[in-house]
Amino acid sequence: MFKTLRSLPKTVWLIGLISFVNDSASEMLYPLMPLYLASVLMAGPKVLGIIEGIAEASSSIFKLVSGVIVDRTKRTKPWIVLGYFLAGAGRPLIALANSWTWVLVIRFTDRLGKGLRSSPRDALLAESVPANQRGITFGLHRSMDNAGAVLGPLLAALLLSLHIPLREIFLWAIIPAIITVALALCLKEPKQDASFVPERFVWSMNGLPPQLKRYIFVVGLFALGNSSDMFLLLRASEAGVPPAQIPLLWAGVSLITTVFGTPLSALSDRFPRKYFILVAWLAFALFYGLMGIPHISIWLIVGLFVMYGLFKAATEGVEKALVADLAPRGMTGTAFGWFNLVSGAMLFPASFIFGWLYETLSPTYAFIFSGSCALLALLLLFAWVFRAPTVIDIKL
């Protein structure tokens, strides 16, 4: 594995470094959002669900737009730079918000940036390496991204321990934003094969293999149960985890994902990727089922967050590598655009439904709903997607 890592192109490492710096800022603020909304802006779980749902679902539309445009123009760098610029410029403005509606607008800008950069970045990663290195490439990217998610919450915990106001912590995010944009400007476009440039913009799924369409549909169903992670942090807080330790708990999840993300994804280059996804989705369903236990203990919360970190490590890179495996030549951006669109668009109903169940009925009903969606998606993935004979399993 280490020999393969050293042989990866500079573009892969640079994109990983960009994600590391960007997530250091993003994840420094992410665990603080529930606290900020509740203690400063006096907003509850329903508002949290609306904000996260609208922001994430809206960004998913631009993931498709940027993916289709990349296939037609064969230009990824402008969208990556613009995406990181919008996200970096928006986060510090949360400190100036005096109502949750302004937080919604700012989060939308942040997620708009993510929407514009995600599909072009994924396409650039997929086209920078051969097929038998896609797993380790996407795994490395997710590991470096999650390494930033380790550093970010640790910085948040440090600043909270120093009694720095929440508003001021949001302002600190401007520094990594500047660094991220500067690094993105250093990216270089790969050589493109003009014979695979589409003659026109294709906004539908026409041209994508049937199995890829099925996979995207099932991923969307799974995403319906995968609401904003902020609800997990809210659940941990209500279970008795001290506010200053919430960022540390989230940093622990990211650390596990960082450590195991690359080796697990690298294994998917040698063994069928489907097994990693099936086992991870089963673990996700179990995780959400146990998180819904009334009067859950702090120690069980900690153990479940460890499981959640392993789930993310086994899926984040592998799911995208499978998209690249199934995508036809010249339509990688479109394939990632639809994958990101469907999975992202479901975050609005997922977060809204979860937040409504959480506040109106009880956390137990909310977590049971998510776990049930995951189990149904798991069954469809096994019986409808992976039973088809055209699944590509890369073996060395």
Image (tube, grey):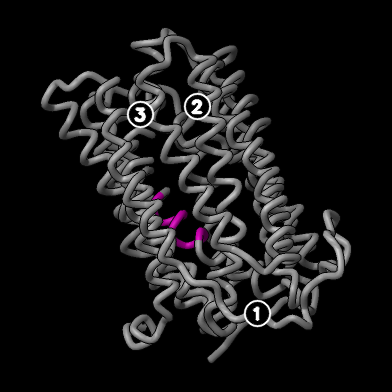
Q: Which residue is mark 3?
A: 236
Q: Main secondary structure of the magenta part?
A: helix
Find disc 2 in the rendering and name its residue. Answer: 106
- Secondary structure at badge 3 equals helix
Q: Nearer the viewer, mark 2 or mark 1?
A: 1
**Which mark sits nearer the N-terminus, 3 or 2?**
2
Q: Which mark is residue 192?
A: 1
Point out residue 325 in the picture as x, y percentages from the top left corner: 66, 75
Question: Nearest the camera: 303 or 59?
Answer: 59
Residue 123 vertical position relative to residue 373 in the rendered view, above or below? below
Q: Spatial distance from mark 1 to mark 3, Cα to Cα? A: 48 Å
Q: Which three-letter amino acid code belongs to the residue tagged 2?
A: Ile
Q: Amino acid at mark 3?
A: Ala
Element type where label 2 sits in the image = helix
Q: Is residue 100 visible?
A: yes
Q: Quadrant of the N terminus?
A: bottom left
Judged by depth in the image, the label closer to the viewer, 1 or 3, is: 1
Q: How much space separates mark 3 and mark 2, taking CA atoms?
A: 26 Å
Task: Measure how far apart labels 2 and 1 are at the Cα level.
Answer: 36 Å
Q: Decide which of tag 1 and tag 3 comes sooner along the chain.
A: 1
